[in-house]
Image (cartoon, grey):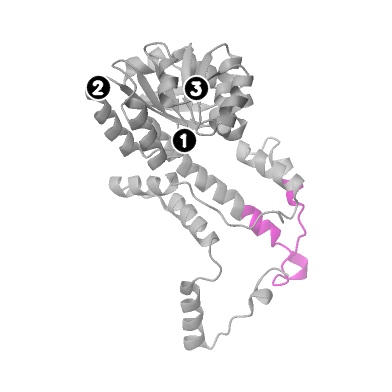
């Protein structure tokens, strides 16, 4: 099958490589000609512009956009649509806000252009592991691209079928799912990333507690110098918290046991915030997910003004004087 790919960064480029490995033909475009040249050397068909990419695709033309969410995606979708015809398919595989998907699908409908949103999880490991795909949009368009989803998805692999699940029930067990109409794919991916924030924060806090288990604030008999890397490794072997995130944590601790190469500054890519927005609109409590998002905000500051207010109140009502930062930290 043929597919156009726009945006050849780590994700887009590796997706093209995985598709070509499965026998699909890819027409590729990127604002940086060097990225196009690299993939053309691997067997892709290079395009010099969006118009050139569309011209090199056979109807109905499917084109996948893998650029940063927000204005870059918006501009690319609309510019691409100017060159497409009725029946063609635009796929947004970035981390777009699901409400933008609904609006774009509606805007493209009069031209007969079908718009799909593809929540894509797999990161830089997707080339080998495959990508978990959460899809939204017109059912017929999703079904038409079945060979593409199947090639990108991990497949069932060595993951056993869920007990009680009927064989052949659907595509979820091979790594892709049509979640519903426009926006549904990115909505599910948004919640996926919100959960990811919570899981990551739980691991981070747990390892931080273990790292400080030898604090001088503790009785000598209750202090422990714990081998964090070895703990991460043993947890990978049959424990309840075994996961890919734990695998990556163990790998990081082998490479840099003190994590001295990291500043502790943690960005958020937007989906965590949107998850909380959705929770508020639905009046659904999301304490853990909210706290994990706020922890990322906190990571970008030193002492906040709010903490200074707390210190001031403690001093005023109880005469408490906070120790200097070097004394308050881990010794």
Q: Is residue 207 highlighted in magenta?
A: yes
Q: Residues within 10 Å of mark 1 (few under 14, many from 20)?
A: many
Residue ID at (73%, 51%): 228
| Label 3: element kind | loop
Instruction: Indicate which disc, 1 or 2, sits on the residue closer to the N terminus.
Output: 1
Residue ID at (57%, 18%): 44
Instruction: Indicate which disc, 2 or 3, sits on the residue closer to the N terminus.
Output: 3
Using the rendered view, name the quadrant where residue 146 is placed.
top left
Disc 2 from disc 3: Cα separation: 24 Å
- The residue that label 2 is drawn on is 111
Disc 1 from disc 3: Cα separation: 16 Å
State the extent of the magenta-drawn residues as a range: 206-231
Disc 1 from disc 2: Cα separation: 23 Å
- The residue that label 3 is drawn on is 47
Instruction: Indicate which disc, 1 or 3, sits on the residue closer to the N terminus.
Output: 3
Q: Is residue 246 highlighted in magenta?
A: no
Residue ID at (64%, 75%): 325
């Amino acid at each position: 099958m043929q597919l156009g790919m726009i945006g050849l960064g780590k994700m887009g480029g590796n997706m093209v490589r995985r598709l070509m490995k499965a026998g699909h033909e890819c027409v590729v475009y990127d604002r940086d000609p060097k990225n196009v040249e690299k993939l053309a050397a691997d067997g892709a068909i290079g395009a010099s512009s969006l118009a050139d990419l569309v011209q090199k695709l056979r109807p109905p033309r499917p084109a996948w956009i893998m650029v940063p969410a927000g204005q870059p995606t918006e501009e690319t979708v609309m510019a691409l649509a100017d060159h497409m015809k009725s029946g063609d398919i635009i796929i947004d595989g970035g981390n777009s806000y699901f409400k933008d998907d609904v609006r774009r699908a509606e805007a493209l409908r009069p031209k007969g252009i079908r718009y799909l949103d593809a929540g894509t999880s797999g990161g830089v490991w997707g080339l080998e592991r495959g990508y978990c795909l959460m899809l939204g949009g017109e059912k017929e368009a999703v079904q038409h691209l079945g060979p593409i989803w199947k090639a990108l998805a991990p497949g069932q692999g060595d993951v056993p079928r869920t007990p009680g699940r009927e064989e052949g029930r659907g595509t979820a067990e091979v790594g892709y799912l049509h979640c519903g109409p426009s926006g549904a794919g990115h909505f599910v991916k948004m919640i996926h990333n919100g959960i990811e924030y919570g899981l990551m924060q739980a691991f981070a806090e747990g390892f931080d507690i273990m790292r400080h288990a030898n604090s001088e604030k503790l009785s000598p008999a209750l202090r422990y110098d714990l081998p964090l890397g070895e703990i991460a490794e043993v947890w990978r072997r049959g424990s309840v918290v075994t996961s890919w995130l734990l695998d990556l944590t163990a790998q990081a601790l082998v490479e840099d046991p003190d994590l001295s190469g990291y500043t502790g500054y943690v960005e958020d890519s937007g989906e965590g915030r949107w998850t909380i927005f959705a929770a508020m609109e639905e009046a659904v409590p999301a304490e853990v997910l909210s706290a994990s998002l706020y922890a990322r905000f906190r990571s970008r500051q030193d002492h906040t003004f709010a903490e200074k207010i707390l210190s001031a109140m403690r001093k005023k009502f109880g005469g408490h004087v906070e120790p200097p930062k070097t004394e308050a930290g881990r010794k």
